[in-house]
Image (spheres, rainbow, N blue to C red):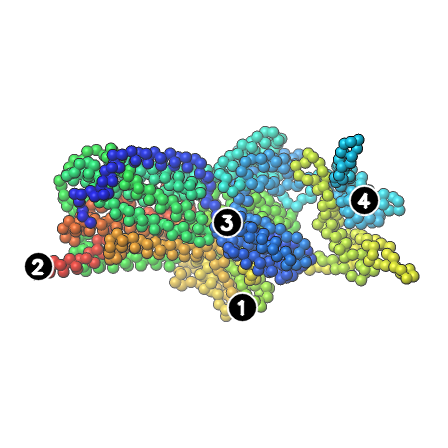
Amino acid sequence: MPHDSGNDGAAGGFVRRVMGGPLPPLLMLLALILGAVALVVTPREEEPQIVVPLADVLIRAPGLDADQVERQVATPLEKLLAQIDGVEHVYSMSRADEAIVTVRFYVGEPRENSLVKVYNKLHSNLDQVPAAVASWVVKPIEIDDVPIVVVGLWSSDPERIGDHELRRLGEEMVLGLKAIDRTNRVEVVGGRPRQVRVELDALALAARATTPLEVAQALQASNVRLPAGTLPVANREVVLEAGEFVPDAEALAALVVNVVNGVPVRLGDVARVRDGPAEVVDYTWLGFGPAAPAELPRGARLPMVALSIAKQKGANAVWVAADVHRHLARLERELLPPAVHLAVLRDYGRTADAKVDELVTSLVIAVVTVVVFIGLFIGWRPALVVALAIPVCYGATLALDYAGGYTINRVTLFALILALGLLVDDPITGIDNIERFLRRGGRDRAGAIAAAIGEIRGPLIMSTVAIVLAFAPLAFITGMMGPYMAPMAFNVPVSVTASTVVAFLVTPWLAARLLPPARVQSTPVEAGATYRVYARVVGALVASRRRAGVFLAFVAVLFVLACTLPALRLVPLKLLPYDNKDEFQLVVDMPEGTTLERTEAVAAALADYLVRVPEVDTVAAFTGLASPIDFNGLVRHDYLRRGGHVADLRVTLAPRQARAAQSHAIALRLRPDLERLAAAHGARLGVVEVPPGPPVLATLTVELYGTPTTPYAELEQAAALTAARLAAEPLVVDVDTSVAAAQPRLSFVTDQRKAALSGVAVSDIAGTLALAGEGLTAGHLEIASEAQPLPIRVRLPLATRSDSGALESLYVKGRPGIAKLREGNALSDAPQPLVQLGELGRFEAGTVASPRYHKDLRPVAYAYAELAGRPPAAVVFDVAADLDVEATAPASAAAPRPLAGRTFLANGGGLPWALPAGVSANWDGEGEWHITLRVFRDMGLAFAAALVGIFFVLYVETRSAVLALIIMSAIPLTLIGVMPGFWLLNQLGERSVGALPDPVLFTATAMIGMIALAGIVVRNSLILVEFVRGARADGLALREALYRAGAVRMRPVLLTAGTTLLGNLVITLDPIFSGLAWCIIFGILASTVFTLAVVPAVYFLVYGKQEGAAAEAAHTA
């Protein structure tokens, strides 16, 4: 490439015309206006939304045990759903009387089309539904079901206003909240609803010869009103109605439910009728910690119900949340008594807006820092040219984000911050070259600017294409991490492309008007200090081919040493680190069959501890039911958690600005004490933090599969063995399996002969016990003032139904037509006797079978575990390495090897273990390790594809494969800085919380940093090599050409490195993307230094011999 040309060429002519026309200012104005509008109107959210179409098929098959449900119901349905196009996985869980089959489509599949496929498949195969299936329903699952706002409605006067009153107030508030535009599901969680409870008196029923079923049937038959058409009366149509609704509980108690010997039996004679709160089936309450406002009560467990509000698809979470809070403030004034208050437990709109504002502030700080840095080195006028280019690029990018359907979220904004160092490179290169041409003289001002831009036109375009090629493959990452990283794959290439357009259109126009008249300098480059220093350093490296080879060998050794750090586990690897959130969750699981009160005692003990933690604001407890779900709970199916043995505690922390510790460090610090409290009550405890990326069942999820003939009991045994081995590993916590604890079961076994002789149907026996134990809704009281239908619930009192002897004393009545009497040649119905249940059968004790799980049509059992400061890869490799079919000792029989002595070159914890014959363990099924493998695989392939694409681009530009490889030789140099840098970070500062480590991790975002570095160093190397070629074309010898090119390019290279480094400093404060920032910082430090030395050394090795031979030939001639 000629280093200078007297002819500007077509490009120079175009630049001249642009400088004299109105296009650049109009382009700037348009980009700024569109960017400002997009910043306001684009929906904001904290994290990118991940669209994964899911649907649950809930099936009831009363009377079937778990094995029958598995074989007759779940398996056929799985086969049908697996035939649907676009389905990635089909899961099922079969237990006595019911099954849940979940179909999950590939990420990005259209949600509506996917659900239509499910409904179509099911309804087109109704003829295959087994007779045992009583009902089924399809429940779509989507991200917009997750509430964006959760508010606790709590009482400061529990004696007067308890959970029942709060529930009723909440139901009234829900009616108002549902009217808010763009809201989705609005619910009340917790509290006892109003209910008309009909508590049967077994002795009174027996005394009046009335059975429980007769009472229920009478109530259903008496509380009816129906339209009966119209009647013509007096030449007019009159509407006819028949029947009457029962108006209240008093009238209900007066209803006649039977007539015995002409004496009416009223409901009040055989039952106690109560209009009030339902029986307690769950507890919800709130406690305040030290971080709550001082005027709030401390230590008390105050009754609470939660109001959860979700938004519609595509709605702006910030705007919807703001509308919700405005309506809540109005409803609080209009509906709530003074003793009832609101506490915000979740507000994703506020956190999203705060996060976006925080990142916009960080972006502004980064821009100002970069501009000031540039100004210090090249002057304020050139810095102003660069500064004006930045908002133009960002404005264009934000406008295209809005047009492309992207939201403003943390990934979008971090992509813009990451792009800052890349997009200022083009204007810096342009303005530096313009200044150099202006100083050289020999042209008019416009001609010098046009020539300067023309000289760097090719390298800038090619380097921009290289960066686009480096980031574009990120768009093809599969799985749930694909949509998460999609804004990065879109925004960085768009920003860099915009910067190249600005460099060719706006920078020359601004330079012509803002740069001062340059004084012509006749001093050659060789006389400058930069040239002398650079020539001395590089001259020592290229003094001979041997020196250059030794230097490159030394660099290669550094590269190999850097690559060994991860292999030696000195740089821990993980998908993503935990974010600094304002919340975490405690999930409590007691053994199946535990009473609600025992589980409530565990929740209370944990809450009593938490409300004394300085960083805790509120603790919301949900015992017996699931708390309002988040995205993590949606994927884990937490909304199905119900029963006396489960509890959730939602812990809200002080705002991150008001506390020194991050939420992950707080969770690590509290974990040992919380685990001791849970263990003392016999509970399994999970400390669940908001996942930093796609949610998973557990960080470590091991799937145990067998052969087609393997009994499911062996899979359960294998899960237990795997869990025991995981529990023996250091820093492995919250170990659990999918195997349910044995729950007692009481079965009434009917004597069919006695029942037939008594004329009693077995269905009446089952119905009587179901009414007694579970209860039966025998209609509703239709009261216009109620927000919800008021059910009439018929049931035995708790004390009676808890006694099997009392249940056996209940009466059932024979049916006509079952028992016959012969009268001559005719048969007549025998009398319908009243028979106690105890005379028709007996209760037998047993246990409920554990659920059966399937994945993709194969039986599977799961073992789960979380990690406290240890990367999943290390645990997986160590435990898998110890798996030995000949092992006989239990995993806990010995002490594990110290972690300090383990590497990926010598895996294993020294605890051999074995699985049953025919059972295999899959370590990358549903846990974080599966996503980690997929993401790093996809990123590796993306990186490889980017390198191939960059090579061909460079080959097209240079027309030389050798030159292309020389330019790319700088890419591996980044590792020399990155890996030792991460190792150094783990040696500095406090990297533990108590006894638990809290290391700095090399994550997927750091891998993105590696890809970004490839683009940066290729750009620098390309322009450096092009300047070398230009200098040689001007007749300089090889060494002088290397010195001149390095000296000329040193300032823009160092400025680019400095701006990239400063721009990424603000990202180091973010827990998720700090890995990306540190990767770029360490990589840019190493690659900048080595690029200015390695590229000349490689160039000299390749072309030095050719030049020497040519010189010798010329001398001989």
**Residue linked to disc 1:** 918
Q: Measure the alpha-carbon separation of dots 1 and 4.
A: 61 Å
Sooner in the amino-acid sequence: mark 2 or mark 3? 3
Which mark is in front, 3 or 1? 3
**What's the residue at 58%, 37% (across, down)?**
178
Instruction: Give the residue type that dot 2 points to.
Output: His
Location of residue 896 in the rendering, given as x and y in whole percent from the top left corner: 47, 61
Q: Kindly state the secondary structure of the residue where label 1 is placed.
A: loop
14, 598: nearer the viewer: 14
From what the image shows, is residue 932 above or below residue 305?
A: below
Instruction: Give the residue type that dot 4 points to.
Output: Val
881, 336: nearer the viewer: 336
Location of residue 337 in the rendering, given as x and y in whole percent from the top left corner: 62, 31
Pointer 1 with pointer 4, Cβ within 8 A: no
**What's the residue at 49%, 55% (across, down)?**
927
**What's the residue at 30%, 35% (across, down)?**
23
